[in-house]
Image (spheres, grey):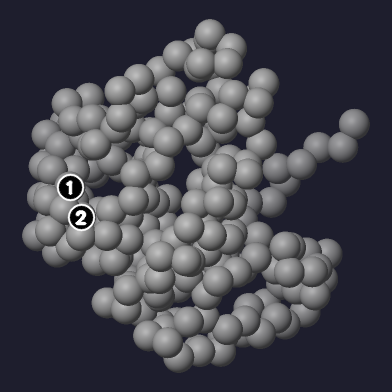
Amino acid sequence: SKVVQNISCGGDKIKTEVLLKSEEGTGMNPIIDAIMNRRSIRKYTDQPVSREDIETVLKAGIYAPTGGDAEPWHFGVLTDRKTIDDLDERGRKAMSQSGIERIVAMGTNPKYRLFFGAPVVIMIYGEKVLRKTGTHLSALADCSAAIQNMQLAAYSLGLGTCWIGLMRYLFASDSCFAPEGFDPLYAMTLGYSAGAEALRPRSRMEDVITWF
C-alpha cells in the first residue's frame, strides 16, 4: 500500500509517498506510521526548534521503559551554534585518531559534520552506577529506549532526528558536559529536515524472524 506523509521543511509541508508492504500496515495507526516512516535526517534547515517542542521530545524520552524503574538517564540540550560546532569539531578530531580506516576517513573529510548542521543536539548520559539498583546494568539499554521514544515524538511533531553513535570516539577523553556520576553515551540531532532529498530510502533484511 502507499502512504502519503507530510514532512516539515522550513515551515512548509513537503508531501512524499512511501511504499509499504501490505503486511506492514497502511499507516492508519499513527504509532505504526511513525515507526515505519521515521528516517534518520542528515540535512537540516536553519529554522529554530521551539522550546515547547524540545521539551515535548524530552518528555517522551523520560517516559521510556526502564529496567527496575531505574531511570538512569540525563539529557543535555545544546542550542548554541558555537557550542554545537565546537563539540562537532572535537568529535571529528577523535574520529580521525581512532585508527579505524573508515572512521578516520570520515573524521578527516572537510565536508563531513557529525551533527549535520542541526540547530539542536541532545546529549544522552547514563548513570555509571544506578542509584536505584546499585548495579552497572541497564543504563545503555534504557537510554537507547529513551532515544527511540524521542525520535518517534519528534517525527510526530514534524521534526527530524539522527541518532549519533560516532561520538563514542570522543567519550574516552571528553565528558561532553556530562554531570557528575554520568557517562556520555550518545547524541541525537533535532531540527527541521531540509527536504525530501534529505531522506534516504529504507530497506530491511528479510529472514530475521523465526516462529517457534
Q: Are marks 2 and 1 in contact (CB under 8 Å)?
A: yes
Q: Is residue 21 visible?
A: no
Q: Within 10 angstroms of label 1, few (less than 14), some, or many (20 or more) residues?
A: many
Image point (67%, 77%), residue name? 19
Q: Is residue 149 above or below residue 119?
A: above
Report the amino acid beneath label 2: Ile
CA separation in Å, label 2 and label 1: 5 Å
Residue assigned mark 1: 87
Q: Quadrant of the N terminus?
A: bottom right
Instruction: Out of 115 and 107, give the one closest to the viewer.
Output: 115
Q: Could one spot residue 74 in this view of the protein? A: yes
The vertical placement of 191 against 178, above or below, is below
Looking at the rendered image, the quarter that the C terminus falls into is: top right
Name which residue type carries label 1: Leu
Q: What is the residue that sits farthest to the right in this orientation?
A: 212
Q: Which residue is mark 2?
A: 84
The percent position of residue 82, horizontal first and vertical second, equals 12, 58
Q: What SS does tag 2 mark?
A: helix
Toward the front, the furthest residue is: 52
Q: Position of residue 61 (x, y in %)?
A: 55, 47
Query: In front here: 12 or 22?
Result: 12
What residue appears at the point 52 percent right and 64 percent down from the top-left corner? Answer: 154
Residue sticking out furthest to the top: 134
Q: Secondary structure at mark 1?
A: helix
